[in-house]
Image (cartoon, rainbow, N blue to C red):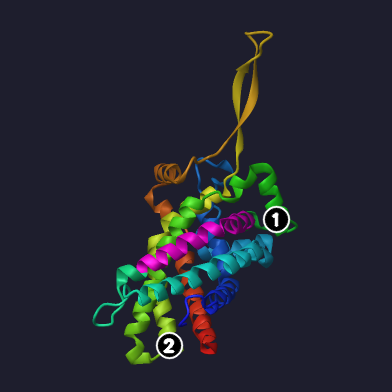
Amino acid sequence: MSDIRDWRPFVYGGMASIMAEFGTFPIDTTKTRLQIQGQKTDRSHSELRYRGMTDAFVKISRQEGVKALYSGIWPAVLRQATYGTIKFGTYYTLKKVATDRGLLHDKAGNESLWCNAACATMAGAISSAIANPTDVLKVRMQVHGRGTSDVGLVQCFREIYVHEGVRGLWRGVGPTAQRAAVIAAVELPVYDFCKLHLMETFGDQVANHFISSFIASLGSAIASTPIDVIRTRLMNQRRVHQLQPSITPAATTTTTTTTTPRLYYTGSVDCAVQTVRNEGFRALYKGFIPTWVRMGPWNIIFFITYEQLKQFY
């Protein structure tokens, strides 16, 4: 990768991301279902239907069919084709730029943690903001599962665009970018750090990639789950109609009702405050187990695939 215009990190990053997404998507579906349940403000999701990841997995399979575990897989694949491609390609390109300018390594040849994290943060935030519409589609289809079995990617996109406009496709973009930045800032530098320090023991082999990616996934799961809960709830919410009294011009004593569209949450902070107030602080870590369980295999599949593809360099 001597040229910063090298296209291979982008292509290999996208291909590895898609492979990892297919392998772990059912776990992601259980995570999304756990995160949206128990909301006091949204009555359609106030019921606690699942006790945990395993219970969610079994109930979704029995009640809606195994196919429901893959509801939203195509927007997820489309997301990885954009987000994964841009994220990993940009990250390694920025590291190359930093190296050429003498910013990444110190005099002893060690990588700077802060510079590494800065490259990862920028790559994660930019790529996730661009790919946000595909994330919204994925969450909507995951939440409704069987209810969207006859609704494809195009139909779901059209429904959001018609009823909510372009802004609906970028709902939750703030916490999405924040989450991606946090994950990238923790995950990528930790992986590179572990891989470098395990090189003497395992070499540049699959065992090294496996251990490094597993360690990286734990840190990113702890740091990102609260933001992920907020992001999922913001993406899933639709404008609802609230009945309000109004006075007719003809008779001031007669009242009728009109509907005014509103959102359950006005933004990230409001969602976080209402979630903690109504459900307790632990609600911000709903879906932590499937998040970690998914991130582990996801990172393992991704980094092993990516490292193998790099052999074609």
The image shows residue 203, relative to residue 252, as above or below, that is below
Task: Name which residue lies at 46% across and 60% down.
Answer: 125
Alpha-carbon distance for marks 1 and 2? 40 Å
Compared to residue 244, the image places residue 14 above or below, namely below
Residue that label 2 marks: 207
In the image, what residue type sits under mark 2? Ala
Left or right of residue 238, residue 35 in this image: left
> Badge 1 local density, few (<14 within 10 Å), some, or many (20+)?
some
Taking the magenta stretch, the answer to whether it contains residue 118 is yes
- Asked if residue 171 can be seen in this view, the reply is yes
What residue is rendered at 42% in x and 63% in y?
A: 122
**Horizontal and vertical percent for residue 214?**
42, 76
Q: Residue 106, image x and y in percent?
A: 26, 77
**Placement of 44 over or under 184, stated as above or below:** above
Stretch of the chain drawn in magenta: 117-141
- Residue ID for mark 1: 148
The kind of secondary structure the magenta stretch mainly shows is helix
Neighbourhood count class around disc 2 (C-alpha, 10 Å): few under 14, some 14–19, many 20 upward: some
Residue at point 47%, 65% (across, down): 291
